[in-house]
Image: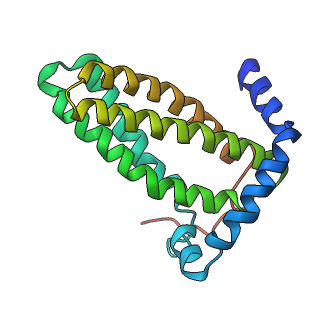
Amino acid sequence: MNKAFQQVTTRIEEAHSLDSVIDFLKTNVGPITEQPLVKKALSGDFLGHPLHPMLTDIPIGAWSMSGLLDVLGGEELEDASTILVGAGVLSALPTAATGLHDWQSTKGAASRVGFIHAAAMDVTVLTYSGSLIARLTGHHTVGKVLGLAGLGVMTVGGFLGGHLTYSQGVNVEEETPNLRAVK
């Protein structure tokens, strides 16, 4: 990992000043996410793996393609870009709910990184919501600028989400499943 990125993630991991806020949130959100039906819906157990990573592809893909259309498209693609921004905002809601569920089981450094990841993604959703409102009210230039800003924040949040999985092993099974060759 790049040294600058490593320094940022290490600082977040060691930011014990976040612990009281994290404890407060977990204490108050836990009873909601631990309700049997809510837990079953958000966990992904019915799929055999966590649901959150799969759902992230939808808003990330929609917003990334919107950015591409905004930069390379033209006025004729503004409506398509607006639809993609809206799809990203709508799909971010269940994605955030599943992430919140997964975050509940983290501790220590992973909990701190998850908290900052969630904060970055919340800013992303708010920025894209503003972009959507601007676009729907005919202010496409403002919508495009907000969209590109959201894309930048999303990249930071996505990096932290990847760090949780690939560096900290959050929701990664320790055992390799039994695989057999396909003939």
Q: Residue at x 22, y 35 (%)?
A: 136
Image height of 54 relative to 9, above or below? below
Q: Where residue 138 sits: x, y (%)?
A: 19, 27
Image height of 146 relative to 115, above or below? above
Query: Is residue 161 visible from the viewing direction of this image?
Result: no
| Residue 21 placement, left or right of 118 | right
Q: Where residue 72 sits: x, y (%)?
A: 25, 17
Question: Which quadrant, please, contains the C terminus?
Answer: bottom left
Image height of 26 relative to 112, above or below? below
Which quadrant of the view contains residue 86? top left
Q: Where residue 164 sits: x, y (%)?
A: 69, 45
Q: Nearer the viewer, residue 100 or 163?
A: 100
Q: Nearer the viewer, residue 69 or 19?
A: 19
Q: Residue at x 25, y 30 (%)?
A: 135
Q: Residue furthest bottom?
A: 36
Q: Residue at x 27, y 18 (%)?
A: 141
| Residue 39 placement, left or right of 182 | right
Q: Which color mode does the image show?
A: rainbow
Q: Residue at x 17, y 18 (%)?
A: 74
Q: Nearer the viewer, residue 156 or 28?
A: 28
Image height of 182 relative to 25, above or below? below
